[in-house]
């Protein structure tokens, strides 16, 4: 079962991969980071500390190994 924090983390991660990877300087990347955090906190009632449990949010279907079946995106 997903919790709000899991949705926020995945949403931030995906937006940073889709949009953030195309930005060319730290000013724009910082702007995107602050916008995503602001929207997540306001919309879902979370805090930065609650969302970022590490320096980076990492998602993939490889967390349980390459031979896992099914490969779950987390």
Image (cartoon, rainbow, N blue to C red):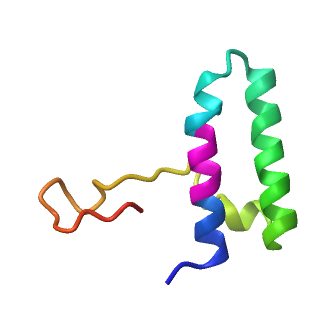
- The C terminus lies in quadrant: bottom left
Which residue sits furthest bottom? 1
Q: Is residue 17 visible?
A: yes
Which residue sits furthest left? 67
Please check the rendered image and state whether residue 14 is part of the magenta-colored stretch, yes or no.
yes
Quarter where residue 23 is shown: top right
Above or below: residue 21 compared with residue 10: above
Q: Is residue 61 left or right of residue 21?
A: left
Q: Is residue 55 visible?
A: no
Which residue is painted at 61% across and 22% down in the image?
A: 22
- Estimate the x, y position of residue 4 in percent, counting from the top left: 66, 75
Q: Main secondary structure of the magenta part?
A: helix
Above or below: residue 33 compared with residue 69: above
Q: Nearer the viewer, residue 50 or 22?
A: 22
Q: How many marks?
A: 0
Above or below: residue 55 compared with residue 70: above
Which residue is painted at 60% across and 79% down in the image?
A: 3
- Estimate the x, y position of residue 54 in percent, counting from the top left: 58, 55
Which residue is painted at 87% across and 65% down in the image?
A: 42
- Estimate the x, y position of residue 32 in percent, counting from the top left: 77, 36
Please check the rendered image and state whether residue 51 is part of the magenta-colored stretch, yes or no.
no
Quarter where residue 25 is shown: top right
Q: Is residue 19 left or right of residue 37?
A: left
| Boundaries of the magenta span | 10-16
Q: Nearer the viewer, residue 18 or 34?
A: 18
Which residue is painted at 83% across and 56% down in the image?
A: 39
Q: Nearer the viewer, residue 51 or 20?
A: 20
Q: Is residue 40 left or right of residue 9?
A: right
């Amino acid at each position: 079962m997903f919790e709000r924090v899991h949705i926020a983390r995945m949403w931030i991660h995906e937006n940073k991969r889709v949009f953030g990877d195309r930005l060319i300087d730290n000013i724009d990347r910082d702007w995107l980071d602050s916008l995503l955090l602001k929207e997540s906190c306001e919309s879902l009632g979370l805090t930065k500390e609650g969302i970022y449990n590490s320096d980076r949010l990492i998602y993939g279907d490889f967390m349980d190994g390459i031979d896992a079946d099914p490969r779950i995106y987390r």
